[in-house]
Amino acid sequence: MSSATEAAAAERRYIDALNEGMATALEEDERVVVMGIDVGAGGGIFRVTKGLYERFGPERVIDTPIAEMGYVGAAVGAAMTGLRPIVEIMFMDFVGVCLDPILNQAAKLRYMTAGALEIPVVFRMQTGAGKAAGAQHSQSLEAWFAHVPGLKVVLPATVADARDLMLAAVRDPNPVVFVENRRLYGSKGDIDADPLPLGKARVARPGEQVTVLTWGQMLRTCLAAAEEGDASLEVIDLRSLAPLDMETILASVRRTGRLLIVHEAIQDFGAGAEIAARVGDQLFDELRTPVRRLGTPTVPMPFSPDLEKALLPTSKAISTAAEALVAEG
Amino acid sequence: MSTSVQASTTDSPAVPERELFATMALIRAFETRVAELYRDGEIPGFVHTSLGQEAVAAGVGEALADDDYVATTHRGHGHCLARGMDVDAMMAELFARGAGICHGKGGSMHVADPSHGVLGANAIVGASLPLAVGAGLSSKHLSQGRVAVAFFGEGAVNQGAFHEAVNLAAIWSLPVLLVCENNIYAEFSDSRTLTRVPSVVERCAAYGVDATAVDGNDVAAVYELASAAAARCRAGEGPFLIEAATYRWHGHYEGDPQPYKPDGEEASWRERDPLEVSGKRLAAVGEASAAEQATLREEAGARVEAAIERARSLPAPDLEEAYADVFGD
């Protein structure tokens, strides 16, 4: 094994893979800049950008004031004019103060100018419940963005994807909402030699009886459910909501005849509803049971770790739901 | 803040008043006809005219280099025309034709032409500011030598986007020229009742950004100030704000009955019609007689009529256009 292959195969943390993806992007293209609150000299509140400032300098790794509307908007303006910014929104919940540059500018301007403007920007945002962070620091809002034409929505669940989807997002000529779950930051894994492209889902574990479709950190919970339960689960890591790889989903559900969609986001009006509708529409006659969803109940995330734990889907709940589907038909 | 940029310094370029007059005449002719065509139902959607404010667009537009960036507002026809946007393609866009500059997908509020540095009119009040800051960031980091101009009204100065953007331009010392058209009205409301500090120059001082007020109905004064300010931006001295005092002859949108304007106010501003202010000077110095000015205005009118006739004859966009340009490859 060559040393390069060895390095590629070496186990690393998700957070380091994100960092590596950004470093590679900064290295390979001088138009790439990293922007956000404390991403520079401080190395990022979660240390995701650690070392980039020292390596690439303050012109490329830019600390911003706590002014998301301003700096996210500036990142979009910079993307329209030659730079390729990776802009961090520290918590996904904070998009409430800077939605316009994402919703009305980045997502729309290519279309409204008939392709005359290109907006290659990556909106990194970190999300996730389970850390007693309260209702304003725990939300999974990916469905909002998937609902907006013109945005790609990427949710890396593995260490390999943390690096590879980051690089793919930066190289993409479109605005990409890049969702990191902070509970994954410390998770370990290997880098794939042959990255799957952005827009393709991945069968994370083959199985026979129930297709379990998920994304983000719920992948680990679903894989645990597959280990723990009695039913044979085929676990699919969706990787991106937009584009949505229906082909992989439909191929799996055709074989299993059963679909369980699991996401950390609120279940009601979540992305699972759209996928369930599409599968119902296209595979109505081939489904052995109705499509089921498992997400968080429609309440703001409470602070109490006990309450929080009670609301988030567990591996037990997933395996039980899957077994119920098998029993049903 | 005090004026650190003086209009009429000895090294200022000579004022090309005849060209400025011709640009104002074009904007006047264009918008006068657009207002009528909108009233008559030939132009769909929303239309916001800048009639009465032409000197700001013409003066700033003429002061810029060909590739400088301009981000503008819902009231942006004048800025686009002053930057050389093609009259035919622009009129066709307002008519929602497939041959429009945005293939009929932008309209009056979103005309854009990056080939002339015009990053677009924008229907979100205040959005031009962060976008221009981003363009300034590109210019600085990629050594483009381009000035980024944000046009906005004094109504936008109450948006957070203004404050965040001005602060960013200041701390990063970007080549951003902030051009506030203070036309007294924020949509239907007298702006002086919406802040305790109606002077935008004063508000700007809080950010350590130099700013100068100018008679926005005097195109030569605007041109001289904008030329000096743009040169300053280009020299790396950071952002500068121009507050141009002017007046919106028409309503917020075409069709606005304007019950909020006090009797006599509009008439007094019409007495200081920017075309007449400039025209008197042109005649006085012997550069263009009243007859020659009339000819310039007739030529502008003919140019606009030709664009209207062409736009009328053009087809609507092909249906496929609706699906094009959402994403780039």
Image (cartoon, helix red, strand yellow):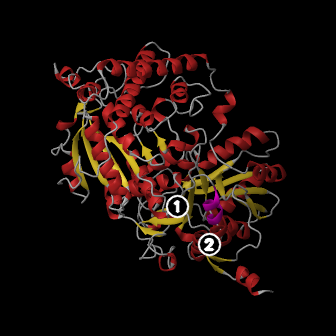
Position of residue A150 in the picture relative to residue B1 (left or right)? right
Q: Secondary structure at mark 1?
A: strand
Q: In the figure, residue B70 lies in which quadrant?
A: top left
Query: What is the three-letter code of the residue carrying label 2?
Result: Thr
Measured as percent of width and height from the top left, residue B181 is found at 29, 38
Residue in view at x 18 percent, y 50 percent: B202
Q: Residues within 10 Å of mark 2 (few under 14, many from 20)?
A: some
Decide if residue A315 is in sight here.
no
Reading the image, the residue beneath label 2 is A24
- Say if labels 1 and 2 share a chain: yes
Question: Where, quadrant-wise, is the N terminus of chain B in this rendering?
Answer: bottom left
Marking on residue A85:
1
Range of residues picked out in magenta: A166-172
Query: What is the three-letter code of the residue carrying label 1?
Result: Pro
Decide if residue A154 is in sight here.
yes
Pick whichever, A248 or B106, lies toward us. B106
Number of dots carrying numbers: 2
Is residue B171 within the magenta segment? no
Measured as percent of width and height from the top left, residue B168 is found at 35, 59
Pick whichever, B87 or B9, lies toward us. B9
Q: Is residue B26 above or below residue B302?
A: below
